[in-house]
Image (spheres, rainbow, N blue to C red):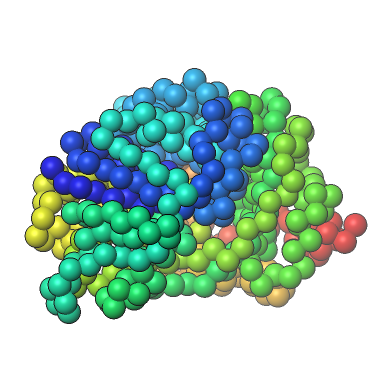
Amino acid sequence: MARILVLGGGLCGLSAGLMLARDGHAVSLLERDAAPVPDSPERAWAGWARGGVPQFKQAHGLMPRARIVLEEELPEVVGACLEAGAAFSDPLASMPPTITDRAPRAGDDRFRTLNVRRAVVEQVLARIADAEPGLTVRRGAAVERLRTTGMNGSARVTGVRTGDGAEFAADLVVDAMGRGSRLPRLLAGAQLDPGRDDVEAGRFVYYTRFFRGAEPVLRAPRLCHVGSLSIVTIPGDNGTWSVTLFAAAGDRALKQLRDPRTFAAVVGGLPRHAHWLEGEPISGVLPMGGVTDRLRAPAPSTPGVLSVGDAWGCTNPSVGRGIAIGLMHVAVLREVVRERLGDGLEAVWRERTDAELGHFHHAVVESDRARLAVATAYREGREPPAPQTPAERVGAALPQAMGRDPDVFRAGLEIFGCLAPAHEVVARPGLAERVLALGGTAPPPPELERGALLDLIAA
């Protein structure tokens, strides 16, 4: 078995460390943040210092695919989350009243989600990892440089050196350092090709507030575009939930949403969402910007290191796919290491990653571009651009069509929950035609006109 170093102690790093250790590898996990793991989920929420994870207290959802991967690979994590106050939910129970056919279908259990805050699921994972034989977790260990052997085309990463001078040798280094991964800088510092990043600059700014109380009734889809603004509502553990407003990064008028009074005024101006304010606030309004859609393509000439999860590719978090894609990627990592540890591992890894996860990333990027164009048009007082390609037309019609047909509703849940790629779902016989017939080709009028939005902000 191999010596494996995992860099980064977030959800993907911890999951990778556990899965690889359980396959018999000697795994060391190095996490830059020094704060110890709190002894309870509530202490994790209240005061765990995770400066290396900017989105730590932002809204998170465990899509159905994330729940499935955990149940298959790390089932005790799901059990511990439930003991910590997480809860299962069934999105089929929230089908809109416009759908009268409520008869169950085979396979409906695949849509079940796990409602839990990011801080809680990470605390649970970290406690399990700390007790795992074969896995050594070192916190406060910031990687300063890579160890390598060979030169030019024969160079290979063989370990790391941390800021305190400690050195760790490895047969494989797994980069799980998330959105802010320093791997390109580390490769360049070792005189190795850092590869390239395909980047779309940060296009959205998020404003999130958490509440506690009796969970509000769902009266609209969890993600709604309401003109130049969008809103996301996500239930959490222990009677908590989050409300997130997000808009184009260049929309300066909306920066006032960081003020709790302005935030409440805008949410209160959305009839289908105002009741989500009827709880006890347990956070201020938490802003987050600078979020990029980025896909990393490390150089094929640098064996010995693999990037996983957000370190490989990160996207707009409003669609809630980050954890699901990350856990799927970790499961692929485990399979590839089982099957091809040694020469040729990196090529197999890239091939499997592109084939199984690349389409999820590219779908979010395309969706982001379309959403930004629509939001910008509303902000500038123009008609939003019409979708041009057949795929764009189906995607634009899908949200409306989901409210009118039980099977289209399920098809949408498959796409949004990462249960199947959009292109495979839409290719099913007759589905695209049905979506277009039910959803129409023109977007519905915005729920909140630009002038009304600015009035709420100015009040």
- At x 36%, y 25%, the residue is 76
Quadrant (top left/top right/bottom left/bottom right) for the C terminus:
bottom right
Residue 296 location, x and y as percent? 35, 67
Viewer-closest of 402 and 239: 239
- Compared with 342, 413 (above or below) is above
- Compared with 166, 9 (above or below) is above
Residue 365 location, x and y as percent? 44, 65
Image side of residue 84 versus residue 446, left or right:
left
Name the image quarter holding residue 290. Answer: bottom right
Residue 221 location, x and y as percent? 58, 43
Residue reaching furthest to the right: 459
Viewer-closest of 102 and 309: 309
Viewer-closest of 257 and 97: 257
Say if residue 406 shows up in the picture: no
- At x 41%, y 27%, the residue is 78
- Compared with 290, 260 (above or below) is above
Image side of residue 258 versus residue 183, left or right:
right
